[in-house]
Image: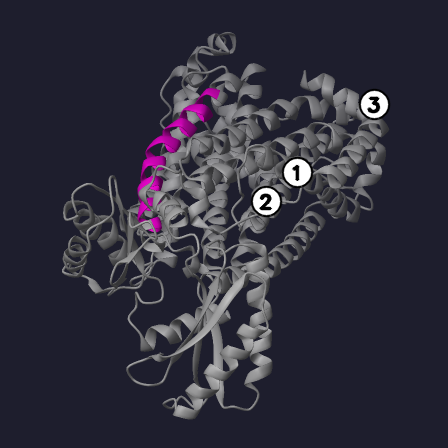
């Protein structure tokens, strides 16, 4: 099948190119716009208590004021606010309210909302919608900031906005600048590395142009699929898609080009060499992409909409990249012919491959030593996983330079840490109206919970059947202690001490994060095993082996542990943790994408064994031929993910390092060293029940390899 696809693409290149251009044009014109979000509530199933609390609030208090932002006002000289200062703040707030910003209902400067030290005053901004990520509201907050700055003038005051909508605004602006930076840095890196590898400007530029087309097609496909599925993509998806598409796309292009160049060096005519290369690496690329797609699709089992929408988006991205690697890339290079390598003449001469040859010889002669040392290194790195702490506050990853982040820090110097974002408790009667005395007693019970700083009197709905309590915590709303309290003692008290004949719900940001943590812990127990089984099945089908997939999965499992452990040591410090999604991201990217290199190596090993070579000689030749391809592909892919470390977003920094490090570990430790070494030790058993003919032809290969006495094999055969 792959040979047929390759020959069609090579022999009918203009047909393939035109079809791709038509698909690109259609998707750009017809596909909906991708609308990412950072709202955690949109990513949790409706059965979680914090999500049900949101619905209770909407039904019982539809006209209630919804906090959208908080203006933090202080003197520029850091001194105490004077009466004139607070009066000026009230005057500006009244003027802003009169300007009637869309979906902003009130701008209130309460004279009592001054910090105990007298240095900070608050101006509350209320909205007609509780969705902090509402596009109109976010735009209005931006306009509000501009109008405020114009009115402050030389008053000697500093006025900055924080809170839900202000944070969404800053997050979107930071994401836009990050996407542009990541795209530019990724393109420059790929072009420079391809130029260094092939010494050809055509090859350096052409994959970038091809993947650019693939990127546009992918964004249209994802936007359409996400809308049809009723999903919302996470805000960070654009930056991740850029590095995935350009990284993986370049990898698959390299797999083809290296094999194409090898056949040219063997004397094949250009189109025949390209068609043969496309046919031979087609199965490898399809298997590699299949592993990645299966791993990403396993995220659809997640109860977290953030993870399931990310999984669907990335799976579609890799699927489109696979189709382009099998069709568009061979077609483009068929049109270019050997001119693609201009001005380099290296494609005409056989390379010495001195370094990879020495590595291949060493892997075939000292498999036990390599396996032992590699395993110890991976285990040592993996020990860092024991100290992993999850950070569930995605806002904590935002740059410190953003206005909302700085304003929140100033806010917390003057007010209780939990006052910026209270937890809400809702009590709903299952019968008649609620009893006021019972509600007062209930409020006192809530105030007695350790870690609760203040409980506001109950606000009762117009029909008297729902009461709302605002609970201020002693802790910052997004920190671990707050989540432990809200998800533990407070929620237990809410349900235990509630008036008879009522239902109770705990809501707010902290409750939401506590439920996110519960959902993520549940997902990890499901997604990881399912992804592992799917990957093993694909490996088994590709290799026609029952044995090899097991040690391949063990090796990538060690790679996952080593990658996450190294990330913990580098990024986790003090009270801070790592992004809660990092383990699943590392697992999927390192285990799935990193397995590409294992597949490429093992596919070449199987090819050499099938041609009748004994296991140790097959290992030497496979490493010699495959190591340059794997090294080049890994450096480029790791580099594209490493670009994320240039972002100001802490989440992207962590992700960039973890995936880049994991890919390099997968390529240079596992694919080039550990997997060939273990395959040598396993001998013909590695391919059971496949390749039995080749195994029977060389019974001596089944003898245990002690790592000596095989020097005569080195260089005895070559291609």
Q: Could you give the CA–CA distance between mark 1 and mark 3, rounded to whole angstroms?
A: 26 Å
Q: Could you give the CA–CA distance between mark 2 and mark 3, rounded to whole angstroms?
A: 31 Å
Magenta-span inclusion, residue 523: yes
Magenta-span inclusion, residue 367: no
Q: Secondary structure at mark 2?
A: helix
Packing grade of label 2 (10 A; few <14, some 14-19, many >=20) is many
What residue does disc 2 label?
241
Above or below, comparing residue 611 to residue 632 in the picture: above
Where is residue 233 shown, x and y percent of the image?
A: 54, 43
The earlier-in-sequence mark between 2 and 3 is 3
Above or below, comparing residue 206 to residue 708 in the picture: below
The earlier-in-sequence mark between 1 and 2 is 1
| Callout 2–callout 3 Cβ contact below 8 Å | no
Q: Which residue is at the front of the view, 99 or 76?
A: 99
- The disc placed on residue 11 is 3
- The disc placed on residue 407 is none
Q: Quadrant of residue 17?
A: top right
What residue does disc 1 label?
218
| Callout 1–callout 2 Cβ contact below 8 Å | yes
Instruction: Tell me the residue at 39%/80% (across/down).
Output: 121
Q: Which residues are magenta?
A: 512-537
Packing grade of label 1 (10 A; few <14, some 14-19, many >=20) is many
Q: Which residue is at the front of the view, 505 or 352?
A: 505
Asked if residue 714 can be seen in this view, the reply is no
Packing grade of label 3 (10 A; few <14, some 14-19, many >=20) is some
Instruction: Tell me the residue at 51%/26% (across/down).
Output: 602
> Which of pointers 1 and 3 indicates the residue nearer the eye?
1
- Protein image colouring: one colour
């Amino acid at each position: 099948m792959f040979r047929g696809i390759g020959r069609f693409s090579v022999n009918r290149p203009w047909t393939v190119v035109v079809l791709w251009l038509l698909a690109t044009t259609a998707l750009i014109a017809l596909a909906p716009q991708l609308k990412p979000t950072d709202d955690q509530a949109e990513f949790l199933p409706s059965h979680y208590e914090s999500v049900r609390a949101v619905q209770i609030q909407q039904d019982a208090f539809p006209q209630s004021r919804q906090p959208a932002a908080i203006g933090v006002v202080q003197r520029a000289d850091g001194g105490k606010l004077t009466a004139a200062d607070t009066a000026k703040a009230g005057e500006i707030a009244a003027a802003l309210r009169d300007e009637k910003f869309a979906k902003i209902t009130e701008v209130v400067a309460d004279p009592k909302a001054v910090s105990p030290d007298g240095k900070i005053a608050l101006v509350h901004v209320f909205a007609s919608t509780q969705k902090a990520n509402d596009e109109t509201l976010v735009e209005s907050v931006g306009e509000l900031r501009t109008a405020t700055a114009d009115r402050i003038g030389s008053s000697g005051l500093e006025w900055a906005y924080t809170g839900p909508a202000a944070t969404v605004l800053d997050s979107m602006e930071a994401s836009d600048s990050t996407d542009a930076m990541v795209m530019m840095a990724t393109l420059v890196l790929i072009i420079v590395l391809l130029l260094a590898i092939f010494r050809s400007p055509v090859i350096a530029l052409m994959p970038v142009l091809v993947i650019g087309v693939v990127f546009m097609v992918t964004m249209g496909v994802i936007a359409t699929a996400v809308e049809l599925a009723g999903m919302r993509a996470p805000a960070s998806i654009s930056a991740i898609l850029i590095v995935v598409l350009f990284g993986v796309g370049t990898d698959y292009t390299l797999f083809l080009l290296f094999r194409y160049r090898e056949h040219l060096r063997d004397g094949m005519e250009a189109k025949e060499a390209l068609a043969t290369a496309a046919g031979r690496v087609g199965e490898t690329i399809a298997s590699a992409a299949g592993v990645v797609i299966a791993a990403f699709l396993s995220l659809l089992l997640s109860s977290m909409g953030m993870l399931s929408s990310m999984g669907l988006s990335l799976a579609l991205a890799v699927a489109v990249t696979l189709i382009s690697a099998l069709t568009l890339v061979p077609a483009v290079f068929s049109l270019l012919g050997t001119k693609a390598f201009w001005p380099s003449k290296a494609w005409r001469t056989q390379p010495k491959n001195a370094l990879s040859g020495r590595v291949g010889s060493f892997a075939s002669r000292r498999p036990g030593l390599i396996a032992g040392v590699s395993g110890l290194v991976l285990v040592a790195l993996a020990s860092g996983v024991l100290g992993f702490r999850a950070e569930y506050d995605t806002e904590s990853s935002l740059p410190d330079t953003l206005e909302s982040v700085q304003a929140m820090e100033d806010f917390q110097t003057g007010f209780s840490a939990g006052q910026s974002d209270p937890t809400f408790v809702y009590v709903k009667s299952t019968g008649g109206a609620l009893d006021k005395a019972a509600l007062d007693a209930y409020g006192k019970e809530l105030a007695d919970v350790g870690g609760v700083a203040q409980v506001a009197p109950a606000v009762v709905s117009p029909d008297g059947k729902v009461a709302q309590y605002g609970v201020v915590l002693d802790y910052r709303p997004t920190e671990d202690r707050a989540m432990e309290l809200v998800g533990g003692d407070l929620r237990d008290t809410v349900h235990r001490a509630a008036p008879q004949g009522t239902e109770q719900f705990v809501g707010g940001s902290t409750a939401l994060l506590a439920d996110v943590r519960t959902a993520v812990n549940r997902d990890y127990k499901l997604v990881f095993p399912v992804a592992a089984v799917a990957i093993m099945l694909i490996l088994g089908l590709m290799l026609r082996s029952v044995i090899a997939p097991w040690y391949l999965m063990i090796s990538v499992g060690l790679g996952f542990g080593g990658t996450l452990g190294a990330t913990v040591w580098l990024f986790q410090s003090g009270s801070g943790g790592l992004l809660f999604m990092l383990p699943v991201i590392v697992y999927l990217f390192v285990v799935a994408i990193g397995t590409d290199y294992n597949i490429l190596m093992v596919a070449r090993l199987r090819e050499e064994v099938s041609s009748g070579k004994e296991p140790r000689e097959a290992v030497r030749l496979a490493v010699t031929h495959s190591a340059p391809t794997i090294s080049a592909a890994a450096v480029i892919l790791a580099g594209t993910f490493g670009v994320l470390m240039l972002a100001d977003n802490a989440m992207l920094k962590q992700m960039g390092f973890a995936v880049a490090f994991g890919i390099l570990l997968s390529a240079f430790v596992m694919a080039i060293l550990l997997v060939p070494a273990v395959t040598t030790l396993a001998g013909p058993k590695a391919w059971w029940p496949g390749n039995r003919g080749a195994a029977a032809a060389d019974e001596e290969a089944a003898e245990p390899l002690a790592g000596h006495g095989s020097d005569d094999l080195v260089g005895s055969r070559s291609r």
